[in-house]
Amino acid sequence: MLIYVLTRRKIILGLSVMIIIGVISYLTADSLTAPSLVRAPGTYYMAHTQEKVVALTFDDGPDPIDTPEVLDILKEKGVRATFFVLGQAVQENPNLLKRLAKEGHEIENHSFNHDYQQHQLLTEINQTDQEVYAATGTHTHFYRPPGGFLTKWQLENIKKNGHIVALWSVDSKDWRNPGVNQIVKNVLDNVFPGAIILLHDGGFHRTQTVKSLAKIIDSLKKQGYRFVTLSEMKALDTELK
């Protein structure tokens, strides 16, 4: 009986490994994974620079609860950031978007409904761009796919649509809600000059993100870093000059 139980466990484990390998094979065959796994050609996830600059980026907002708190901290610290917004959230919170623009933050595109498969890719990008323009009078130039996933075909069509695919090089993993100290550690342990840092101001309760933000900013300032928007970061990239 013991031999049967062990064998059954091995079979289950073997099937699980095969499924995981199959999923990875599918993703890498025709798609690009998040930059923490693959430095995807044709995407923008860091700047090549010796200057101690970083870009704070926030996904999934604007959120009526968490975004104002994030903005209050950024204003207090004198930091400008880049917000990858959802078109649907913009529709529901246009005044928050106006505040983002008024306080000097950069507003970019994160799709309309956060569909991971992006079945209506260009439609969602254009819908979100229209919502941003209606609220602020500005257009989006960078696009960040939900989850950081996209196929090569999607990447090509996003470029043809006039947007740059922007990913990230430092994942705070705040989307896991691992605790404030862990979020701070995830950033500080992996930061480098030219890093693009991934955070979230929407999508779920972001209390941990809010509580970690001031600590991240203060710690990076002590290390001599200054904060720039994504467009400013790109302008500093020595490989693009």
Image (cartoon, rainbow, N blue to C red):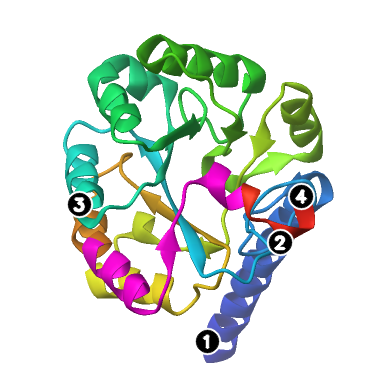
- Does the residue at mark 4 contact the one at mark 1 (Cβ under 8 Å)? no
Q: CA distance from mark 2 to mark 3?
A: 32 Å
- Does the residue at mark 4 contact the one at mark 2 (Cβ under 8 Å)? no
Q: Is residue 133 above or below residue 53?
A: above
Q: Is residue 145 visible?
A: yes
Q: CA distance from mark 3 to mark 4?
A: 41 Å
The amino acid type, in three-letter code, at marker 3 is Ile
Q: Is residue 123 above or below residue 27?
A: above
Q: Residue drawn 35% across and 21% down? A: 90
Choose the circle earlier in sequence order: 4 or 2: 4
Residue 38 marker: 2
Q: Which residue is mark 1?
A: 1
Residue 233 marker: none
Location of residue 231 by image quarter: top right
Q: Which residue is mark 4?
A: 26
Location of residue 39 by image quarter: bottom right
* Image x and y of residue 226, in percent: 42, 63
**Mark 3, mark 1: which one is toward the viewer?**
3
Q: Which residue is mark 3?
A: 73
Looking at the rendered structure, the secondary structure element under dot 1 is loop
Q: CA distance from mark 2 to mark 1?
A: 45 Å
* Label 1 Cα neighbours within 10 Å, binned few <14 / some 14-19 / many ≥20: few
* Image x and y of residue 113, in percent: 45, 24
Is 186 magenta? The answer is no
Q: Is residue 210 above or below residue 109?
A: below
